[in-house]
């Protein structure tokens, strides 16, 4: 059974993913504070602990999608350019071995409430198991995908086969050989599950509302001997900090129509061939800001994708000639042979845009055209109530006793996506208003994590008890969030980036899309002046 959590701590981190691991190590080793992680799961990994559905893999390449701590990477070699969840779990086990993190983790300890007590100047945190802990610093490092989203379909409980949300997959896996399966949702998750299941199941039904603009992954086996170049690795980490997306490459420094049609075609072709997210992230610099430019790249993508699909109706359904939304304003997934699956007679695309799901029945899924799609297993790949859903689940209350999630009902306010007024000494890595989802995760986590470490160091050395951002500083950061988002095509599309995937959720840009260099500059300014803080 899990160990009992301590009563008192200097710093309490919630969540043992990339952010939690990085911060535990840095706060323990560099600040010598008494710091622990409370984690709902049973091992390190965060998103890579929970997301073990078939075909789950990361779509940022390695080397690069990893922490830059040398004690980790010097004894580690990656096997594939885009690692699977299995390899990522091995990576976290390696981190643990090198840095001895689990000794400071309390697993199966889900935090259900956290409140700042002004008279004691500390947080009181309760877990589901009933333990209570007091801490000076609270770091919810819970990621954006903590709260799964399952639409409230009629008859959901009546389905007699196996049904799982992608983030609550059984570790032992699900054997679909000879079975009929359904995948609901075609985001990054749905694409990966479909690609995997369609190769095993007898019949596969893919329930699609919006086609994904998936890009070829171009997976590669990696040569261990080429991962031994220490200097190269250091340069890769340093370079990643200088690019918009925290990756070791940047976009084309020209606008789309600066180039001739032939040059443009050649550029798209190169990016498409290099693979991964490049056609999105490394493309012309006006891709996300100019309608016509965006359309141009969409049409290149549609042409390429349609050529891989045999059936003319399916071409239109999976890769229509006319874009349904601006390219890249919904997350393109990476695929290996997703489109080819639909050329198989046992793989069926079900259009739930025109005929939504009416209900689930004991033996399958009924759509509003009255058709029953009989299935034995269902994968629910409908995504997450991202960021704010997790904050709500954690039950964070500010110094006035008000739920943070309630304060954010009509709009998110943060300072640099890292702190919140009336929540003294609370730091929120990889959360709302951070560059997280528009950047390589570990890179932005280290930017934010080292900022948190620097602030705490300064507080400790100057005897500061509490720190919180001023309301007007939060207001200014919100204006920055909106200003940079409004320069892009992002607000024109319904997506989880805008909160519009969840019925009733306030629609607004949830993340910072100003790029990592600009973000780092803002963070650095905040540390030098301190005018934005109230300290006691
Ligand atoms: P996403 O990207 O939110 O995708 C969810 C999918 O589920 C998407 O295709 C949705 O269609 C579909 N969906 C959502 N609600 C419904 C309902 N009510 N009926 C039918 N279909 C629905 O989640 P993922 O888990 O794939 O990815 C999350 C992120 O994790 C990903 O972007 C990576 O960054 C990692 P829609 O597009 O809304 O029409």
Image: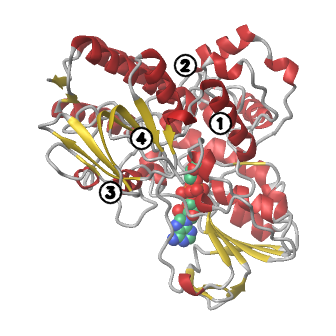
Question: Which of the two discs, 3 and 1, labels the residue nearer the N terminus?
Answer: 1
Label 3 crowd bin: few (<14), some (14–19), many (20+), radius 10 Å:
some
Q: Position of residue 378 (x, y in %)?
A: 67, 73
In the rendered view, does 403 fall on the left or right side of 72? left
Q: Residue at x 63, y 53 (%)?
A: 51
Question: Which of the two discs, 3 and 2, labels the residue nearer the N terminus?
Answer: 2
SS type, badge 3 = loop
Q: Which residue is mark 3?
A: 506
For the residues carrying marks 2 and 1, which lies nearer the camera in this image? 1
Q: Quadrant of the N terminus?
A: bottom right
Question: Which of the two discs, 4 and 2, labels the residue nearer the N terminus?
Answer: 2
Q: Residue at x 60, y 52 (%)?
A: 50
Question: Which of the two discs, 2 and 1, labels the residue nearer the N terminus?
Answer: 1
Question: Which of the two discs, 4 and 1, labels the residue nearer the N terminus?
Answer: 1
- Residue 454 makes an appearance in the image: yes
SS type, badge 1 = helix
Q: Which residue is mark 1?
A: 92
Q: Quadrant of the C terminus?
A: top left
Q: Compared to 439, does 350 lie above or below? A: below
Q: Which residue is mark 2?
A: 241
In the rendered view, does 272 fall on the left or right side of 438? right
Q: Compared to 32, does 369 lie above or below? A: below
Comparing 80 with 184, the one in front is: 80
In the rendered view, does 424 fall on the left or right side of 42? left
- The numbered disc on residue 431 is 4
Label 2 crowd bin: few (<14), some (14–19), many (20+), radius 10 Å:
many
Q: Residue furthest bottom?
A: 370
Q: How many marks?
A: 4
* CB-based contact (under 8 Å), mark 4 and mark 2: no
* CB-based contact (under 8 Å), mark 2 and mark 1: no
Ligand 1 under 8 Å from disc 3 Cβ: no
The answer for how far apart the CA atoms under marks 3 and 2 are is 32 Å
């Amino acid at each position: 059974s899990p160990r009992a959590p301590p009563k008192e701590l200097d710093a309490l981190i919630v969540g043992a993913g990339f952010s939690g691991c990085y911060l535990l190590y840095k706060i323990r080793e560099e600040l010598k504070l008494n710091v622990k992680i409370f984690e709902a799961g049973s091992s390190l990994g965060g998103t890579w602990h929970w997301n073990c559905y078939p075909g789950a893999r990361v779509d940022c390449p390695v080397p690069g999608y990893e922490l830059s701590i040398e004690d980790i990477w010097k004894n580690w070699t990656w096997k594939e350019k885009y690692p699977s969840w299995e390899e990522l779990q091995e990576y976290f086990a390696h981190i643990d071995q090198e840095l001895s993190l689990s000794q400071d983790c309390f697993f199966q300890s889900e935090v259900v409430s956290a409140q700042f007590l002004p008279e004691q100047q500390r947080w009181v945190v309760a877990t589901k198991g009933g333990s209570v802990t007091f801490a000076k610093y609270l770091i919810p490092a819970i990621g954006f995908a903590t709260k799964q989203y399952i639409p409230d379909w009629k008859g959901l409980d009546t389905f007699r086969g196996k049904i799982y949300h992608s983030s609550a997959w059984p570790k032992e896996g699900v054997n679909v050989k000879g079975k009929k399966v359904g995948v609901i949702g075609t985001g990054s998750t749905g694409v990966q599950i479909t690609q995997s299941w369609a190769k095993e199941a007898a019949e596969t039904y893919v329930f699609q509302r919006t086609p994904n603009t998936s890009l070829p992954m171009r997976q590669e086996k990696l040569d261990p001997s080429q991962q031994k170049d220490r200097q190269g690795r250091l340069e890769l980490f340093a370079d990643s900090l200088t690019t918009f997306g925290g990756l070791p490459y940047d976009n084309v420094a020209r606008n789309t129509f600066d180039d001739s049609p032939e040059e443009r075609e050649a550029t798209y072709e190169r990016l498409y061939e290099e693979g991964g997210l490049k056609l999105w992230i490394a493309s012309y610099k006006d891709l996300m800001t100019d309608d016509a430019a965006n359309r141009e790249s969409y049409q290149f993508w549609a042409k390429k994708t349609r050529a891989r699909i045999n059936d003319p109706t399916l071409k239109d359904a999976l890769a229509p000639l006319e874009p349904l939304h601006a390219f890249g304003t919904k997350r393109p997934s990476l695929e290996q042979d997703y489109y080819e699956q639909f050329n198989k007679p046992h793989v069926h695309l079900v259009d739930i845009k025109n005929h939504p799901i009416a209900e689930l029945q004991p033996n399958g899924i009924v759509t509003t055209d009255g058709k029953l799609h009989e299935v034995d297993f269902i994968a629910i790949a409908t995504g997450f109530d991202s960021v704010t859903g997790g904050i709500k689940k954690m039950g964070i209350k500010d110094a006035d006793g008000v739920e943070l999630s309630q304060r954010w009902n009509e709009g998110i306010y943060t300072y640099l996506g890292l702190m919140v007024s009336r929540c003294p000494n609370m730091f929120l890595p990889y959360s709302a208003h951070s560059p997280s989802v528009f950047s390589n995760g570990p890179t932005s986590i280290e930017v934010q994590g080292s900022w948190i470490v620097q602030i705490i160091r300064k507080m400790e050395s100057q005897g500061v008890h509490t720190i919180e951002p001023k309301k007007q500083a939060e207001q200014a950061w919100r204006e920055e969030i909106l200003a940079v988002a409004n320069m892009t095509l992002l607000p024109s599309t319904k997506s989880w980036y805008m909160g519009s995937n969840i019925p009733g959720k306030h629609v607004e840009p949830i993340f910072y899309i100003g790029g990592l260099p600009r973000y780092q500059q803002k963070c650095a300014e905040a540390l030098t002046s301190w005018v934005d803080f109230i300290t006691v």
